Image: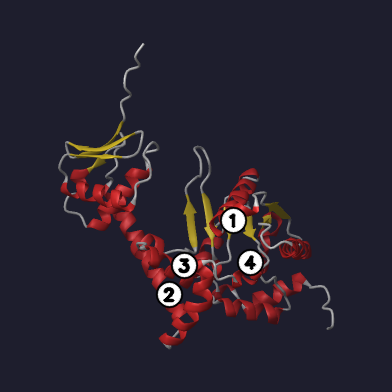
């Protein structure tokens, strides 16, 4: 077999940009990028797969004035041995070809802890630390329409509402992970494209990518959906099912944004930390549910409620009558005088 020569990464980026011009990307991301300050640094999460490679090439090509402040982050999960090490070398070569600094991290956890969810959490923890050290807020991610369908079906299976079903969002502002931290912004311009379109453009542009063999492992729910369910779902629909899922995601995001705005206009959480049950009286349950979620998030000492516990508290808020419900070892949710408050658990006096 003839050995392939080195890749002209800058040439591949220029060709990929012609094949996937800005109007093929998600329009809200293109508008967002045009309005950002020139001094802002951008980070790209680079795994070496086709989506992240295309993302890096397109950001580099479509926003040339950002190149001096563009960075790439690669995280080695150490799950696939020599393959993972080859991924890291491939990403380093691609970044060197574009002149983009690459920061790499390695997961040090034992093999017993390398489950899918833990791997994802470790990757984002590394990226968050790296961005914080460089005072960066914007992270570009390579999810596309196939990912929308997979995520939607996964979340339908566990009973998510519109907020969960609206993921992944093209522009997602995340609250600071710690007091005094800075909010982060996740940007996904490829949500308007299918994985096959992205891979086809890369081939035509003369670029290459790495293949993750763990994606064939049917142990993970996402992989089973990707290999077994979604292809049959597409064939059974006899239409552009991936495009339909992407449109549903857009509509769900609109609905979710409207409900959040309604809750904000009501202003049910007071400065003293209480939730006004009176302001929520007679409102649709979706509005009351979101207001209660906000209130719980504002209570740092409250334990996470089970789904059943949350529904019990939600029904109590709707009734508005006096009520008391445990929020873990530190206190209770108490409804009194048409207000919901967190009451700390009183410690028993120490006997001497």
Disc 3 crowd rating (10 Å Cα; few below 14, some 14-19, many 20+) is some
Q: Earlier in the sequence, mark 1 or mark 2?
A: 1
Q: Cβ–Cβ below 8 Å for labels 2 and 4?
A: no
Q: Is residue 80 left or right of residue 278?
A: right
Considering depth in this image, is 150 or 7 the residue closer to the camera?
Answer: 150
Disc 1 crowd rating (10 Å Cα; few below 14, some 14-19, many 20+) is some
Q: Cβ–Cβ below 8 Å for labels 2 and 3?
A: no
Residue shown at 67% from the left, 49% from the top: 108
Q: Earlier in the sequence, mark 2 or mark 4?
A: 4
Q: CA distance from mark 2 to mark 4?
A: 21 Å
Q: CA distance from mark 3 to mark 4?
A: 18 Å
Q: Earlier in the sequence, mark 4 or mark 1?
A: 4
Residue shown at 58% from the left, 66% from the top: 142
Q: CA distance from mark 3 to mark 1?
A: 17 Å
**Image mark for residue 52:** 4
**Image mark for residue 119:** 1
Q: Which marked residue is nearer to the observer: mark 4 or mark 1?
A: 1
Q: Is residue 115 left or right of residue 307?
A: right
Q: Which marked residue is nearer to the observer: mark 2 or mark 3?
A: 3
Residue at the spot of label 2: 245
Residue shown at 46% from the left, 78% from the top: 243
Q: Which marked residue is nearer to the observer: mark 1 or mark 2?
A: 1
Residue at the spot of label 3: 151
Give the percent coordinates (x, y) of residue 7: 79, 73
Secondary structure beneath label 4: helix
Q: Cβ–Cβ below 8 Å for labels 3 and 4?
A: no
Residue 120 figure quarter: bottom right
Q: Which marked residue is nearer to the observer: mark 3 or mark 4?
A: 3
């Amino acid at each position: 077999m003839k050995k392939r020569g080195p890749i002209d990464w800058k040439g591949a980026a220029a060709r990929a940009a012609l094949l996937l011009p800005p109007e093929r990307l998600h329009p809200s991301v293109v508008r967002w990028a045009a309005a950002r300050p020139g001094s802002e640094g951008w980070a790209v999460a680079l795994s070496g797969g086709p989506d992240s490679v295309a993302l890096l090439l397109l950001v580099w090509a479509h926003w040339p004035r950002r190149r001096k402040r563009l960075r790439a982050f690669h995280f080695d999960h150490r799950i696939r041995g020599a393959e993972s090490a080859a991924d890291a070398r491939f990403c380093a070569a691609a970044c060197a070809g574009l002149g983009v600094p690459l920061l790499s991290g390695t997961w040090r956890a034992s093999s017993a802890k390398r489950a899918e969810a833990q791997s994802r959490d470790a990757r984002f923890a590394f990226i968050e630390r790296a961005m914080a050290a460089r005072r960066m807020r914007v992270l570009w991610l390579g999810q596309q329409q196939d990912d929308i369908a997979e995520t939607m079906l996964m979340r339908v299976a566990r009973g998510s509402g519109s907020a969960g079903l609206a993921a992944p969002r093209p522009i997602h502002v995340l609250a600071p992970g710690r007091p005094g931290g800075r909010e982060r912004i996740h940007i996904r311009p490829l949500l308007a494209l299918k994985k096959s379109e992205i891979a086809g453009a890369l081939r035509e542009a003369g670029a290459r990518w790495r293949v993750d063999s763990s994606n064939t492992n049917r142990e993970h729910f996402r992989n089973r959906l990707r290999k077994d369910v979604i292809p049959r779902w597409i064939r059974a629909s006899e239409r552009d099912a991936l495009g339909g899922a992407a449109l549903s995601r857009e509509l769900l995001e609109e609905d979710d944004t409207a409900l959040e705005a309604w809750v904000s206009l009501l202003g049910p959480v007071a400065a003293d930390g209480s939730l006004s049950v009176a302001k929520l009286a007679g409102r649709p349950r979706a509005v009351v549910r979101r207001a209660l979620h906000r209130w719980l998030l504002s209570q740092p000492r409250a334990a996470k409620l089970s789904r059943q516990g949350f529904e019990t508290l939600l029904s109590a808020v709707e009734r508005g009558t006096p009520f008391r419900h445990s929020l873990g070892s530190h206190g209770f949710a108490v409804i009194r005088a048409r207000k919901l408050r967190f009451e700390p658990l009183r410690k028993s006096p120490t006997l001497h």
